[in-house]
Amino acid sequence: MKSKTGQYDKRVTLRIPLPNSDGRIDGAAVWAAWDVKPPKGREIQVQDMSAAEQTRWIKIRYVPGITSAWGIRYDQEYDIASPPIDFEMAHRELYIELKVMS
């Protein structure tokens, strides 16, 4: 059965950044709704090379303190592309844009 968009049906792990390091450690496991907005893709140029960049959106219940330095682990490790969006500042849900790392 195909899941409906917006359902909290994926268990993801929040990855907390380590102070004074580039590493992250596992934090809380939370339920997420996957692909709540259409995925985006673009091509970026770095010197003479081009690379594809793709993002996906998830939605989780509100967790204070998450920044773009955090990561998400589900089927792979994802970086958070931009600061999470607290819709209408209601502290109920966060929309998080993830960078697909290939």
Image (cartoon, rainbow, N blue to C red):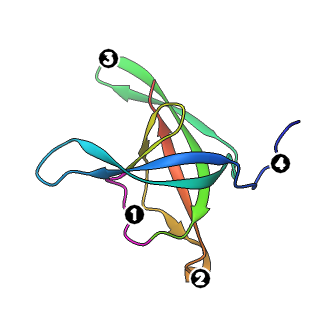
Q: Nearer the viewer, mark 3 or mark 2?
A: 2
Q: Specify start and end residues of the magenta stretch as a single range.
A: 64-70
**Element on which disc 4 rests:** loop
Horizontal and vertical percent for residue 74? 53, 38
The disc labelled 3 sits on which kind of residue? Answer: Asp
Say the numbered circle drawn on residue 66. 1
Q: Is residue 77 left or right of residue 20?
A: right
What residue would you read off at disc 4? Answer: 4
Instruction: Give me the disc on residue 48.
Output: 3
Labelled pair 1, 2 in contact (Cβ < 8 Å): no
Q: Nearer the viewer, residue 45 or 34?
A: 34
Q: CA distance from mark 4 to mark 1?
A: 26 Å
Amino acid type at mark 2: Ala
Does the magenta-highlighted stretch encompass residue 68? yes
Name the element at disc 3.
loop
State the CA–CA distance, disc 3 to disc 2. Answer: 45 Å
Q: Nearer the viewer, residue 5 or 45?
A: 5
Q: In this view of the protein, which residue sits in the foreground, 44 or 17?
A: 17
Which quadrant of the view contains residue 30? bottom right
Q: Are marks 4 and 1 in contact (CB under 8 Å)?
A: no
Name the residue carrying label 2.
90
Assign a secondary structure to mark 2. loop
Left or right: 36 as drawn, with respect to 102: right
**Badge 2 density bin: few <14, some 14–19, many ≥20, Cα 10 Å:** few
